[in-house]
Structure formats: C-alpha cells, structure tokens
Image (spheres, helix red, strand yellow):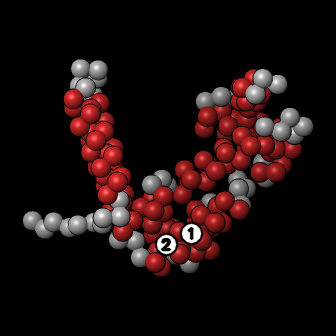
Amino acid sequence: NKIRIISTEYTSLYKKCFTKLIEAFEEQQDSLLSPYVEAYNFFDILSRKSSMVSTTSVDLKIIKKGIHYIEENLCPQNNVSEIAKMCGVSVGHFERLFKIYAGVSPTEYINANKVLYIKKLLQDRTLKLSEIAEKLGYCDSGYLCRFFLKKTGMTTKEYRNLYFSSLNI
C-alpha cells in the first residue's frame, strides 16, 4: 500500500479533530454514537482537504469564477449549465470541481446564497415581500415564500418576527 502525506498545512485542524475523536471515546457513556460521528467528521474533513490539495490552479480559477458569478447573480434563472458554460467547462466537470472545492453541489451553494440574501432583505421592515421577490427575479412573492419555507423550515413572516424579537424592537 502507498501512504501519501497530504500536507502539514492543516496540522492544527487535524489535531483538533483527533482531540474531539479521543474525547468522544472517553465520554462514550453520554452518547454511544458520538465516537462514530466524530470519526465520520474527521474522515470527511481529511477527504475534503486531500481533494483540495490535488486541485490545480486552473481548476481553482474555474471554481472561483463560478462562485463569483453565483454570488453576484442570485436570480432564479441561474442554472449550473449556464455557469459551467460561462466558465468554459462541461456541467459534469464543473459540478465535480465545485463539490471538491466547496463541499456542496453548485445548486446547494446557489440556494444557500439565495436564502442568506433573502434573510438580509427580510431584516429591512420597509421592504415588502413582492419587492424582495422582484430583487431576486421571482415573478411573485408566493414562490419566494415557498422557496424560503422549504429551505429554512420557517415562513418569511416567522423569520422576520424572530429577527426583530431578538433585537427587542
């Protein structure tokens, strides 16, 4: 078998993961699953870091271009095939590179950014839902509300109430 040293760049991260894993085994009486969860987390992080080390500078340029485009253009018409085409690669190649680099699929990343942007806009009491939907390019606020509920588990009204109640306003 071949052993490959990934990097010493992440030594502190690996040490932290090992410490959590050891603590999970020592405190096993709290939860029998905790050692398995920590072991999974460790190997997941190790796998991601090793994948990133093997990512070339050309691949990183492609992904960074895609991420920049996603973050600047949150309209619902954004789809992975258009972004891959803009980056000059196939959809499959873009999705694989993106997953390695970001740890999530491009679609998940797009949706997460939309949710964050919607939350930011909901923090402005003066904005109506129809205005927020328009800013995102949705044709109606109903779709925006369904999308938000599906991704967060709460309605836009619940989010606003929760946000403003946390500010004691």
- Residue 123 position in % (x across, y down): 78, 37
**Which residue is labeled 2 in the image?**
60
Relative to 108, 49 lies left or right: left
In the image shown, does 28 or 125 lie closer to the viewer?
28
Task: Answer left or right for 148 relative to 98.
Answer: right
Q: In this view, does 32 lie above or below 129?
A: above
CA distance separating discs 1 and 2: 6 Å
Vertical placement of residue 166 versus 72, above or below = above
Q: Mark 1 points at which residue?
A: 64
Q: Residue at x 64, y 66 (%)?
A: 68
The residue positioned 47% from the left and 79% from the top of the image is 58
Q: Type of residue at label 2? A: Leu
List x then y, in percent, for residue 100. 42, 61
From the image, which quarter does the C terminus lie in?
top right
Toward the left, the furthest residue is: 1
Name the kind of residue labelled 1 in the image. Answer: Lys
SS at mark 2 in the image: helix
* Crowdedness near tag 1: few (<14), some (14–19) or many (≥20) residues, C-alpha within 10 Å: some
Question: From the viewer's perspective, is residue 74 above or below residue 143?
Answer: below
> Is 63 on the left-hand or right-hand side of 25?
right
Dot 2: few (<14), some (14–19), or many (≥20) neighbours within 10 Å?
some
Residue 90 in the image: above or below residue 29: below
Please state, as top left, top right, bottom left or bottom right, where the N terminus lies in the image.
Answer: bottom left
Classify mark 1: helix, strand or loop. Answer: helix
Residue 49 appears in the picture as rendered: yes
Q: In which quarter of the image is residue 52?
A: bottom left
* Occupied quadrant, residue 81: bottom right
Is disc 1 in contact with disc 2, using a CB cutoff of under 8 Å? yes
